[in-house]
Image: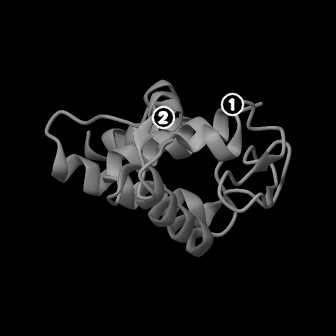
Amino acid sequence: MKKSFLLLFAFTLTVNAKGFNPQMQQYINQLKSQAQKEKSGFTDFNAKRGQKIFTSVHIGKRGKNISCSSCHSINLQQTGKNIHTGKLIKPLSPFANTKRLSKVKDVKKWLRRNFNDVYKREGSAMEKGDVLYYINSAK
């Protein structure tokens, strides 16, 4: 019985992995564990919630209305442009830019920085996981 449960749990993680590389999947699993501690009843990340987080507008750290899509655009397969510096941003979608979501260190840095820019705080584990699922689903 215990072995069957473990196999089912491993299969569920694989199905929900959404095609992340092994290092990113390990990070996703850490976020899931943290999200379960932060919110009772948490089951998995959700790309639709991630889209809502990504596109919702807030007064950012520079005092202006901003969303993640303000710089990254709505179409994650297209090049974005930083609204403050004018710097071009390569597509976020791993389907358009294979380097995206490949290095955990870079993902952590940019999630921390961008949540702070838009929300003026660090994102929760659930928010981060939802956004990562959304970005990874952008085909």
Which dot, 2 or 1, sits closer to the camera? 1
Give residue 58's quadrant in the image: top left
Q: In this rendering, is residue 6 above or below 103?
A: above
Position of residue 65 measured from the top left corner of the image (x, y, whole percent): 47, 40
The earlier-in-sequence mark between 2 and 1 is: 2
Identify the residue shown where x is 79% and y is 61%: 87
Identify the residue shown where x is 57% and y is 35%: 134
Relative horizontal placement of residue 130, taking residue 106 as reference (left or right): left
Give the residue furthest to the bottom: 105
Q: Amino acid at mark 2?
A: Gly
The residue beneath circle 2 is: 50
Relative horizontal placement of residue 3, taking residue 135 as reference (left or right): left
Position of residue 49 measured from the top left corner of the image (x, y, whole percent): 43, 28
Q: CA distance from mark 2 to mark 1?
A: 13 Å
Circle 1 Cα neighbour tier, 10 Å, few/some/many (<14 / 14–19 / ≥20): some
Identify the residue shown where x is 55% and y is 35%: 15
State the mark number for residue 15.
none
Name the foreground residue: 48 vs 82: 82
Name the foreground residue: 16 vs 93: 93
Whether residue 58 is visible: yes
Identify the element where label 2 is drawn.
helix
Q: Amino acid at mark 1?
A: Ile
Position of residue 3 measured from the top left corner of the image (x, y, whole percent): 34, 46
Whether residue 18 is visible: no
State the mark number for residue 74.
1
Q: In this rendering, is residue 9 above or below 110?
A: above
